[in-house]
Image (spheres, grey):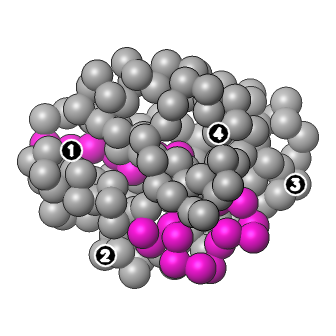
Amino acid sequence: MMQIKLIQPHQIEEVKHLILAVCQEIFQVPEEVILRHDSLTDIDNFQSEYFNNTGTFLVLVDNHRVVGSGAIRRINNDICELKRMFFLKDYRGRGLGMKIAQKLLNFAKKTEYKKVRLDTRKEMTQALKLYKKLGFYFIERYNNSSCTIFMEKKL
């Protein structure tokens, strides 16, 4: 049975493994290369990075296995960031990303953020389609990440 839940401490390594597996599949590079660009330490510190900082972190669980994730992280009082939207291949294209994204956007709206931003890459074609469908539009770079595409949505 599939459920969307708040991340729990015992799921940290599983979420990191999920993200690394998806990145390796899409970018066709070794784990070390991915970790050079993204240390994933925000996941290790999810309580302080997300929950204690006006954000949230969700996981999609199928029979006790983490198969997807998504989060909202505060940038400032008015703007938050959609983060860590990753799904195993077998779970993509089934509307599950849309479900998690809508829960995250509802959280952002209830928390009274005015805008949601995100960063991604052109290789993340399915994610880009989802973000456009959700009403995100392209903007100028807003951070110093290794990403090349930046988007925003007004709430």
Above-or-below relation of 87 to 78:
below
Task: Specify the label residue 28 is tagged with.
Answer: 3
Location of mark 1 (residue): 79
- At numbered mark 3, what does the secondary structure look like: helix, strand or loop? loop
In the foreground, 148 or 94: 94
Mark closer to the chain start, 3 or 4 = 4
* Span of residues in magenta: 78-99
**Mark 2 against mark 4, which lies toward the viewer?**
4
Mark closer to the chain start, 3 or 1 = 3
Q: Please, what is the three-letter code of the amino acid marked with disc 4?
A: Val
Location of mark 4 (residue): 15
Q: CA distance from mark 3 to mark 2?
A: 29 Å
In percent of the image, x 87 and y 47: which residue is there? Answer: 29
Q: How many marks?
A: 4
**Mark 4 against mark 1, which lies toward the viewer?**
4
Mark closer to the chain start, 1 or 2 = 1
Above-or-below relation of 27 to 130:
above
Q: Please, what is the three-letter code of the amino acid marked with disc 1?
A: Ile
Q: Is residue 48 left or right of residue 155?
A: right
Mark 3 closeness class: few <14, some 14–19, many ≥20 residues within 10 Å: few
Location of mark 2 (residue): 135
In percent of the image, x 87 and y 54: which residue is there? Answer: 28
Q: Is residue 35 left or right of residue 124?
A: right
Q: CA distance from mark 3 to mark 4?
A: 19 Å
Give residue 80's quadrant in the image: top left
In the foreground, 89 or 23: 89
Q: CA distance from mark 3 to mark 1?
A: 32 Å
